[in-house]
Amino acid sequence: MAATKGAAKAAVPARRLTKEELVKTHATHLKKQNNSPNAPRPVKQPVISDAYPASTKSIRELEIIPLSELQPETHHRGKGIIVRAVSPPFLGAGAVSIVEDEFGNADKLAIYNQPDSSILSAVPEGCVVAVKEPYYKNNGAAGDYMICVDHPSDVILLRFTDPIIPEALRLGPLLKTADEWKNAGDRAFIEKDFPTAVFCYTEALEAAADDATFQAAIYAKRAGTNLILGRYDAAKADALASRTGGPQDWKAYFTAGRAAYGLCNYAESNTLLTTALDLQPSNPAIQKEHARCQARLHEEATGEYDFAAMHASLGGGVHLDRGSFLRHTRVAPSRHHGRGLFATRDFAAGELVFAEKATLMPNQYEPARASAALFALVVRQLCDNPSLAGAVLALHAGEAADAVRTGMEGAVVDGVPVVDVFVVEGIRTKNCFSAPRSTLEDTRPSVPEGWAAKGLWVHASRMNHSCVPNTMRSFVGDMLISRATRDIKEGEELFQQYVPVKALPDVRNEQFKKGWGFECECALCASERRSPEAMLAKRKELLAAVEKLCNKKLPGKELVPDATIRAVDRLAKQLEDAHEPDVYEGVPRLTLIYPCNWLVAAHRGRKNHAKVVKYALKVLRNFGFKVPEESEAWDPREMYAKSGDATLMTVHVVAALRTLADAYKALGHDEMAERCIEAAEFGYMIVTGSKNDLTTLDK
Ligand SMILES: C[S@@+](CC[C@H](N)C(=O)[O-])C[C@H]1O[C@@H](n2cnc3c(N)ncnc32)[C@H](O)[C@@H]1O
């Protein structure tokens, strides 16, 4: 049954462009193509509202139809086509080729979302492909149509000897002997055309099916090539297949160990590298990899990281060679939604809860490109390393994307894992985090906003959102660090803020609803829901008025006039009075933070230290913290541990504490000043992930 999508079902078109017309136009496009190998290729990111599932059938179960039977705007369910590329590809967001079938019908084939590691990312002229359950669409102009392949697993590169290829499309094998294929593979390898090298070595293996020694050598070559391509599953399998039982097997174990390392499977890597080392105890390359693996296992077990070294290494790349420390947290059903992350032991405020290396994070910090780069990387990983697919595919994808799941995602059909790009995009949007190169650097006032990579951390992704969360995440390169913002008990659910929360409860909940499909029930949102509409309206009105006034005169180099300060103070007081004590007991008062911070800055400019103290304390209170009294002997860390379960930790808390310290110092209250600095530094560790002094805040 053919299924139409969008426009009403059209019949077979009366006229399509002829092969000559197609080839001629294609040739003009090819002339304009940017052939530079380093030219960035755009990514066609799928639009979830157009979602359709990936084919889950083998090409051998489908009815093969001629191109002439394709109907526009139709998904040809139950059918397939087999075609040969008769042109070089035009490479843009996809690879567009002119193809023909066994009857001489020609058409345009656009293949999207193939990883660079696949030959099909740039379909070579002459190769034969099968497209499963093709989607055919009009290209705008009359007679101009295109077969459009979004899911990478919907197109299969056929081996030249595959009996499914119709007689008329057969070229016969280009090369005949195993040696010829091996040599072709070696040539491709030298030219750094690794996908072609893998293809040729595969043909060589087939051609030498009876020669185990020859095969072992080819497996070793293919293992090395797959390792370079980042196809670690295949590299490991090939390496192990290259074993002969002799002393030279150390090479097989060494390659397999490096492949397991690439999969971040350090326990398995350690076993394989140890075997390699047993066979070649004095080999320095194995010793080095083995030591590296031991270091990862140590990090996984202890959570001991040299954060200063991690920051220092960022110049050399953002993908840090570190293990993930996850062992004191676990994924379990949550009463808020699906599954959540839970503490498996007590944590003190400030402690490292977990640290996770990105499952996937492209080194792309340009805001316009970051999302597409992550999407492409997830697709690539699912195609290239099926063993990692489970953890990614298990993530929540949102209702729209979940609706197209067939349950076959990740299953290998026709030799490739089923990859559904709409499910991938759903997973990306619901689970990715924006990551600055370093949160520490990001707290500098001079850093431009919005410069962040997008990445996927499958463990951290399990955390549900709270506006007053008990953990806070930060980044160093592709490492996500999660620290406790207050004391956490064993068994407690862990929460994080998905995005910096907006002050008004209706505005922020609208954002959650739109972005993630939920309404927040954290202590703050639950409290604020108890406040009548009229009070919310009053707070909104006062907030708008005070913001307008504050924005007219931002405290900077010039002194703010007394009259303006008095007016802001009056409005801030009214706004404070519009917070019902029973509703806001023990929870933040977010609308008050902006005017209070403004008043801190205005009074600081006038060196009115007592007023700075007054308003900085209010800022802390408005983030939900119990503020220190001068008369009390307080341990600075208690501010985090003993302020209740509804505090909101941000860098503004650190800044307020530091300003408070300066004001106390100016007033001659040295002890309070010292304690505030200690509290600020402790808070800065929570914010940035590691111990740092406060100097970065000024740069
Ligand atoms: C990154 S996932 C979090 C893990 C998710 N609970 C799971 O089962 O995989 C994001 C999704 O969790 C849900 N979610 C997160 N925080 C929530 C909360 N506070 N209340 C209700 N649902 C929430 C939303 O459906 C959101 O799209």
Image: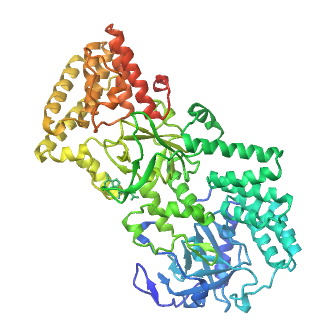
**Can residue 477 be seen here?**
no
x and y percentages locating residue 621 in the rendered image: 25, 29
**Residue 132 in the image: above or below residue 297:** below
Residue positioned most to the front: 278
Q: In the shown orientation, is residue 218 left or right of residue 632?
A: right
Please state the quadrant of the image where ligand 1 appears.
bottom left
Count of marks overlaid on the render: 0
Q: In the shown orientation, is residue 18 left or right of residue 139?
A: right
**Can residue 593 be seen here?**
yes
Q: In the shown orientation, is residue 382 left or right of residue 657?
A: right
Displayed quadrant of residue 108: bottom right
Displayed quadrant of residue 299: top right
x and y percentages locating residue 78 in the rendered image: 52, 87
**Residue 33 in the image: above or below residue 312:** below
Q: In this orientation, which residue lies closer to the viewer: 42 or 619?
A: 619
Q: In the shown orientation, is residue 494 left or right of residue 287?
A: left
Which residue does the image show at 67% across and 60% down from the upper left?
232
x and y percentages locating residue 249 in the rendered image: 82, 59
Q: In this orientation, which residue lies closer to the viewer: 482 or 506?
A: 482
x and y percentages locating residue 326 in the rendered image: 50, 47
Which residue does the image show at 67% across and 58% down from the upper left?
230
Q: In this orientation, which residue lies closer to the viewer: 315 or 458?
A: 458
**Residue 548 in the image: above or below residue 558:** below
Which residue does the image show at 48% across and 30% down from the upper left?
446
**Residue 658 in the image: above or below residue 201:** above
